[in-house]
Image: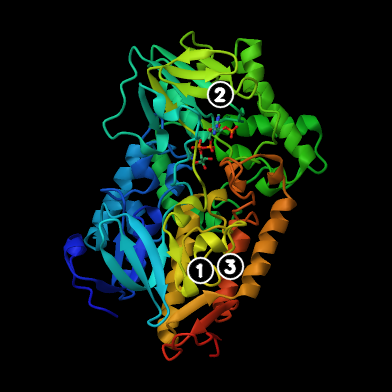
Amino acid sequence: MSDASMDVNTAGESADTDVDAVVIGAGFSGLYMLHKLRKQGLDVRVYEKGDEVGGTWYWNRYPGARCDSESHIYCYSFDGDLHEEWEWSERYPEQPEILEYLQWVADRLDLRRNIAFEREVTSATYDESSDTWSVEMADGERVSTRYFITAVGCLSKPFRPDFDGRDEFEGDWHHTARWPEDGVDFSDKHVGVIGTGSTGIQFISAVGGRADHLTVFQRTPNYAVPARNRPLEDDRYEEIRANYDDIWERARDSRLGMPFEHEHETAYGLSEDDIREVLEERWQQGGFRFLHTFEPGSILSNAELNETVSEFIREKIREKVDDPETAETLVPTDHPYGAKRPPMDYNDYYGTFNRDDVSLVDVDAAPIERVTAGGIRTTDDHYDLDVLVYATGFDAMTGALLALDVEGPNGRTLEQKWNAGPRTYLGLMTHGFPNLFTITGPQSPSVLTNMPMAIEQHVEWIADCIGYMDDHGYDRIEASEASENQWVQNTNMLAENMLFSEAKSWYRGANVPGKTQVFTPFPGGLDNYREICARVARDDYDGFELGRPSSSAGDAVSEADD
Ligand code: NAP
């Protein structure tokens, strides 16, 4: 292990430094990875672009930002003291509270001393002669490391459509994922928002009524299910605390990393009326419990059941919106429920469109032609705006990874390797890039689950793997090409057997023009995935190739032999 004594916050001024592990990002993943590896005696350095910890919850400060996972499971499970000491205030945590939680964890575990803030990685290059990664920052700092671990999040590179005239707009514009810390004043303003995904839906419900007028530019309507947020009363909290072990066990052993029971495994043998009755019960419970009316995999693969569920939601939308024409514009018919990430409704989203100061523009029927100095021109009309908000999502799953400009042995870049879509083994490593671990990488369950559950499993697997390598004298690991090919094929096949291909979603890269369209997360369930990863580790990292220090440049790495 190298010398762990350096204060990283002065690293920019010092000469090149060697560490055991570099972790990129100080959100949920990066913080836990740092904690785990440091406990194993490694010298770890985290580089974070922001000036604080928090990751997603640092950057996404837009009005209404809140997590769709219930607060008591949207946190770390690895340390019982943390959930004994922390108390969430609401059923779904709001962005400032999650940020405060992560700041508290960073202090509580004394993590900040190994985090360098305001450091943007501009490249990472593998040096075959020393089997190390050289990681370079925008300020010129360069650090060499044995292990290069990305904790950059799946939804962290904002996507802003390249509309004609985009830069001519003379009002204020903001992307929701880069929201100003001081907020934005909407009073007396004509505000326009593009996008009605999870973010847009939260933003629209929060800002409707706060602006002189809010114009919503919607291309595709979505299925928003009521979250039914409420304060967490003391007695409910006591119950949660008393049952945490069981809650975590059920969450880890579930498809989505959530401990919710489903009412029925499938719809087999149930009449339409029976189905609607249980759907209504779950609609009243709200949130992801609705998706758990049936085993979620069944809703996501049985087209007939899915159509009943989708139609149930469509009727709810029609009931809530006064103007029938507006209601029909808000009713999704182009994709089955769940084929896109299902959004939640916290604040009467559909009722917002009954307000006189909120209007809906269907930019599927009349597309945006250009952004002008004073607003937006569609093929139908011009909309005058003082503030333009892009709730247009992310270059998801791969955008933030490729932005690191990673170059493996022989000069091959990750971008070249993934030009027809990402390829990994278990979402943890990609062949040809030794010692590069990707927390919640493509082809792992990640975004299809309650993220902290998926993150913890990856962090623990990577830490165990590094521990195994140390114990057995290996210093190099990479996914074998054969195991990677098999895993990619497996992931694609599972996705094809579900309804995901029926939506133009960011799960498939369909939201970014020109991006290769391939379903990216592993859809086989966190429970199954955990078992696969555990078996691979038990079988001495089956499907990975491990090398010893003696394997000098150019030597083939060997399969684990002991
Ligand atoms: P998103 O789901 O990708 O939605 C982007 C929206 O922008 C869509 O309505 C899209 O329309 C629209 N859009 C994009 N380009 C456009 C164009 N050229 N013209 C018109 N409209 C355009 O992004 P997001 O809402 O930021 O959500 C991304 C993910 O982040 C979510 O799915 C979720 O996983 C996560 N998230 C979670 C929470 C939470 O837990 N509460 C909150 C926010 C986000 P189309 O649908 O037609 O493409």
User: Residue 278: x, y in percent?
Assistant: 69, 34
Of labels 3 and 2, the one closer to you: 2
Mark 1: is the Cβ under 8 angstroms from ligand 1? no
Amino acid type indicated by mark 1:
Arg
**Residue 522 x %, y %:** 61, 56
Q: What amino acid does circle 2 point to?
A: Ile
Which mark lies nearer to you, 3 or 1?
1
Label 3 to label 2: alpha-carbon separation: 40 Å
* 3D distance between C-alphas at marks 2 and 1: 39 Å
Between 44 and 400, the one lying in front of the other is 400
Q: Earlier in the sequence, mark 2 or mark 1?
A: 2
Name which residue type carries label 3: Tyr
Question: Horizontally, is 104 left or right of 550 in the view?
Answer: left
What is the CA distance from the residue labelled 3 to the residue labelled 1? 18 Å
Q: Look at the picture and state if 120 lies above or below 368.
A: below
* Residue 79 in view in this figure: no
Location of mark 1 (residue):
412
User: Which residue of the protein is positioned furthest toward the top in this rendering?
Assistant: 356
Mark 2, ligand 1, within 8 Å: the answer is yes
Question: Which residue is drawn at the image coordinates 51% and 13% (left, top)?
Answer: 382
Left or right side of 517 for 181: left
Which residue matches tag 2?
368
Q: Where is residue 280 in the image (x, y as percent from the top left)?
A: 66, 29
Q: Which residue is located at x 55 percent, y 13 percent?
A: 381
Q: How many marks?
A: 3
Q: Which residue is drawn at 41% across and 65% down?
A: 149
Instruction: Give whichever of 119, 355 is nearer the camera.
Output: 119
Name the element at disc 1.
loop
Residue at image mark 3:
425
Q: How crowded is mark 3: few (under 14 residues within 10 Å), some or many (20 or more)?
A: many
Report which quarter residue 18 is drawn in.
bottom left
Mark 2 residue element: strand
